[in-house]
Amino acid sequence: GIKAKRAEFELELCSVVSVSGSGFQSSLTLSRGSVSGIEEGDCVITGDGMVGYVDQVGLNHCVVKTVIHVDFNASAAVSRTREVVVSSGDFELAADGLLKVPYLENDANVRPGDVILTNGGAYPPELILGRVVEVRQESHGISSYASVEPVVDFSGLSTVLVIKEFHVEN
């Protein structure tokens, strides 16, 4: 039902050929590539939320870095408060299958259970990245961060959608 709900997306259905690495090096290989119009940087989703982004493209395959990969960064927002934040892969948290929302004020209004969404920019807005598991103060004490559990189970994926184009309406 994603195609009907998100008509602004040009989508390509792909099979997941393999899951590689884990934690901060988590990636997937998909069954489609440049012949199907897939390009580096394209966003990859399921009906649940964002999986990651296309990092490498061959003629008939592509490699996707997941949202917990250490190279992942996206503008995001807390759905409950609309506070704009950053989401990123983190070396330590990825070992537990989590991504990070760093640079929060120590008194930020972010709680466990809050949903983190993409906020536009390189990726379409309003895609679910995950849910906050915990908010902790950084060791330096200047700021806090949230640990976020992705809504997508990467190990159980068989098909995904690549967003080849999207149009944001104002």
Image (cartoon, rainbow, N blue to C red):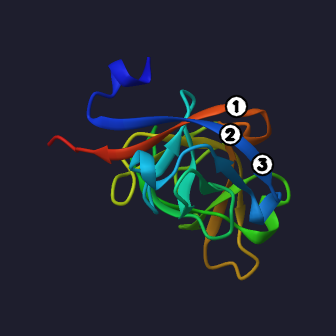
Relative to 97, is 101 on the left or the right? left
C-alpha distance separating marks 1 and 2: 5 Å
Disc 1 to disc 2: CB gap under 8 Å = yes
For the view shown, which residue lies furthest in the left direction? 170
Residue at image location 48% in from the left, 61% down from the top = 74
Relative to 78, is 166 on the left or the right? left
Viewer-nearest residue: 117 or 82: 117
The location of residue 18, given as percent across then percent down, is 76, 46
The location of residue 77, given as percent across then percent down, is 44, 50
Residue behind mark 1: 158
Indicate whether 130 appears above or below 29. Answer: above
Other residues around mark 3 within 10 Å, as few (<14) / some (14–19) / many (≥20): some
Tell me, for residue 148, which label it has, or none: none
Amino acid identity at mark 1: Ser
Disc 1 to disc 3: CB gap under 8 Å = no
C-alpha distance separating marks 1 and 3: 10 Å
- Tell me the quarter of the picture where residue 27 sits: bottom right
Disc 2 to disc 3: CB gap under 8 Å = yes
Residue at image location 73% in from the left, 41% down from the top = 154
Amino acid identity at mark 3: Val
Residue behind mark 3: 19
Residue at image location 72% in from the left, 61% down from the top = 136
